[in-house]
Amino acid sequence: DNMTRLVLVNAIYFKGHWNKQFKVDSTRDAQFRLNKNDTKPVKMMHQKSKFPLTYIPEANCQVLEMPYKGKELSMLIFLPNVMEDSSTGLEKLEKELTYENFVEWSRPDMMDEIEVMVGLPRFKMEENYDLKNVLISMGMVDAFDMARSDFSGMSPANDLVLSKVVHKAFVEVNEEGTEAAAATAAIMMLRCAIMPATFIADHPFLFFIRHNPSMSVLFAGRYCSPE
């Protein structure tokens, strides 16, 4: 609006092709289980190939790594074995999945590369998030306070205050690979065990796109329902 004086944007874009692509003619209609009682139709991609896979007993979930070409980046999919609760089935996994556990559970030496029958939904997701309250809860308070904000290094008049931080993310997964993008805009205004042979993601799961050399997570999401 007419009070906006500065927009700070941090953006990231990624488009990767699977190291082992799915064949389009292997994609079939399937039912995706939203919870214990409800399902929705989905296009399920299929392939049988060798992938790094492990099982995490304490979270009762499988972890599959699907590398992109060059193997510098991978998608990691955390799939609960059973839907133990009455909603998405992810509650136990998300409770156990601290950053330390994520690093431990997805370590390359924790996984075995075995032949797996993989079933993965073809999906597209786009979300918007208001990060103001999240940042305030993490201690970033002064930047949003008219009386205490200090952006004098950016504006000699020191007349700027952070009013909103918006994050937008986009992810598309298909037979060829993954396309993902994210942007964060900060708007400033004037003050005034046994390995399973199958990995069928036909119920809610978590996914991460990881930069393997640094073990850094570039994108993270949860898939709970087809469009």
Image (cartoon, rainbow, N blue to C red):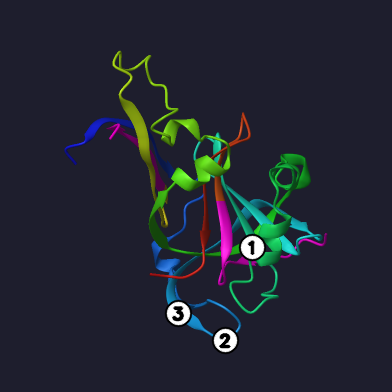
Q: Can you tell which of label 2 and label 3 is closer to the viewer?
A: 2
Give the answer, above or below, for where 182 lies relative to 148.
below
Give the quarter of the figure containing the C terminus: bottom left
* x and y percentages locating residue 91 in the rendered image: 66, 66
From where the camera sits, is residue 185 visible?
no
| Residue 177 included in the magenta stretch of the image | no
Residue matched to label 3:
40
Q: Which amino acid type is marked by label 1?
A: Leu
Tag 2 secondary structure: loop
Q: CA distance from mark 1 to mark 3?
A: 18 Å
Mark 3 neighbour class, 10 Å CA radius: few under 14, some 14 to 19, many 20 or more? few
From where the camera sits, is residue 65 visible?
yes
| Residue 201 included in the magenta stretch of the image | yes
Instruction: Report the span colored magenta.
Output: 179-207
Identify which residue is drawn at 58% across, 57% down: 206
Q: Which amino acid type is marked by label 2?
A: Asn
